[in-house]
Amino acid sequence: MKFFIDTANLEEIKKAKIFGVLNGVTTNPSLMSKEFIKKKDIYDHYISICHLLDDENGDVSAEIISTNYMDMIEEGEKLSLLHPKIVVKIPMIKDGIKAIKYLSKKNIKTNCTLVFSSGQALLAAKSGSSYVSPFLGRLDDLSYNGLNLIREIKTIYDNYHFKTKILAASIRNPLQIIECSKIGIYAVTSPLKIILSLFYHPLTKIGLKKFLEDYKNIFN
């Protein structure tokens, strides 16, 4: 399973690279706003993110802010020209699906975002979206089972051999990453702190401490 980091912070991306498990980056307008980037510098920031990733480190989802068809196409084409790693992130709305269909025919990679139902995921796949981003955590926040949605989408995509890749988003904890890996989806995208939490287990810490203590007792 691929690990994408959900951030627009360059230092976080550099840190994630060090661990050797980073496969891509997803951004959105909210994450970009946290970096206090001026409007005129947004495209340059996307390029900077792309440059941080090695050739094997996958894609960078850059989200459009337009909500009508013609503007979506124009903005999507501009984003796609910034760097080969750019994936145009498009919201699950009617004009968004139309834009995905258009861009996919031009071999421009897309990521259909803000997906909360299997029906929406089906439309995204039929439109030719490269990725679909179901928001697992936000569903859980509303007492819906987000993992059940991931399972449904995986079943539907397998039934019809859709090429759209499932990128589980809005990850809230490491258990959700593990459960997604059991389902067998392509990737998850999460904040770096959640990916790093996979490192930790109390028995690992206890075991390492015991090994080091025993070593000192023997050789000191």
Image (spheres, helix red, strand yellow):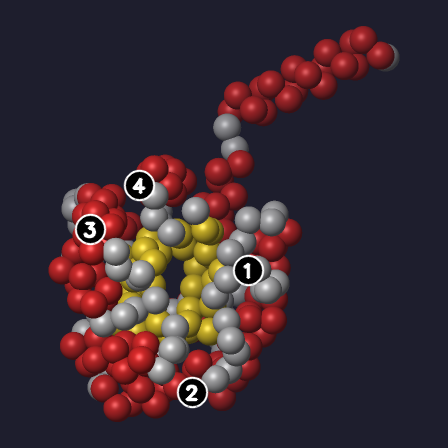
C-alpha distance separating marks 1 and 3? 29 Å
Mark 4 lies on residue:
183
Q: Reading the chain from its start, which is encountered first: label 2 or label 1?
A: 1
Q: Quadrant of the C terminus?
A: top right
Which of these two is toward me, 220 or 175? 175
C-alpha distance separating marks 1 and 4? 23 Å
Residue 31 point in image, percent of width and height:
42, 67
Q: State left or right for residue 170 relative to residue 56.
A: left
- 1 and 3 marks in contact (CB < 8 Å): no
Please tell me whether residue 175 is drawn above or below residue 56 in the rendered image: above
Q: Amino acid at mark 4?
A: Ile
Find numbered disc 2 in the image and state the secondary structure of the residue it sits on.
helix
User: Residue at 58% across / 74% down in the picture?
Assistant: 48
Quarter holding residue 151: top left
Residue 154 point in image, percent of width and height:
25, 49
C-alpha distance separating marks 4 and 3? 15 Å
Q: Which mark is residue 148?
A: none
Which of these two is toward me, 52 or 40? 52
User: Residue at 64% across / 51% down in the picture?
Assistant: 18
Which residue appears farthest toward the right when viewing the image?
Answer: 220
Q: Amino acid at mark 2?
A: Lys
Which of these two is toward me, 178 or 162? 162
Mark 2 lies on residue:
78
